[in-house]
Image: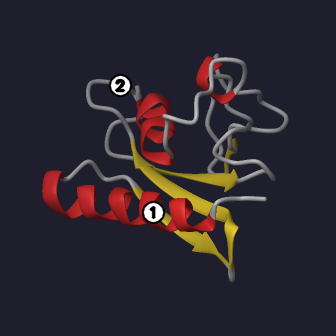
Amino acid sequence: MVDLGRVQKEQQECNKVVQVSGTGIIVSPKGDSLTHLIGTIPGPSDTPYEGGTFKIDITLPDGYPFKPPKMEFATKVWHPNIISQSCAICLDILKDQWSPALTLKTALLSTVS
């Protein structure tokens, strides 16, 4: 089962950080469920993606936060760390290096990096 209380806190933290520090990271529910979310991230500075806004489809599996979220770009992007057919993000923290100490915010910040 997904810890929905934690998901709500993480969503609020992402959205609060946007207002305070201007990171541009926003997380919101996709529909009525807190297990299917949409993340919005800005294109990193000094890259071809600068100035862009990118949407990431986030699915939280049963067992979250002990299992990593499944994240894939909803916006078409070409990058060596993104599987072109599925738009899945290839990051070690989204696979075998995931820890319950990590959050949606850290996963999205790692994606921006």
Front-most of residues 79 and 99: 99
Residue at the spot x=38%, y=39% of the render? Answer: 43
Q: Which residue is mark 1?
A: 11
Instruction: Tell me where residue 78 appears, x and y as whole percent.
Output: 63, 29
Residue at the spot x=45%, y=63% of the render? Answer: 11
Amino acid type assigned to the residue bearing label 1 in the image: Gln
Q: Say left or right for 111 vs 33.
A: left
79, above or below 13, in the image: above
Residue 105: tell me if it is visible: yes
Instruction: Tell me where residue 5 appears, x and y as whole percent.
Output: 54, 67
* SS under mark 1: helix
The image quadrant of residue 81 is: top right
Q: Say left or right for 31 vs 50.
A: right
Residue at the spot x=50%, y=32% of the render? Answer: 111
62, above or below 16, in the image: above
Amino acid type assigned to the residue bearing label 2 in the image: Thr
Instruction: Tell me where residue 58 appears, x and y as whole percent.
Output: 66, 53
The local crowd at label 2, few if under 14, some if 14 to 19, many if 20 or more residues have their Cα within 10 Å, is few
Distance in Å between CA atoms under marks 1 and 2: 27 Å
Dot 1 and dot 2 residues touching (CB under 8 Å): no
The image quadrant of residue 87 is: top right
Instruction: Tell me where residue 13 appears, x and y as whole percent.
Output: 34, 59
Q: Which residue is mark 2?
A: 47
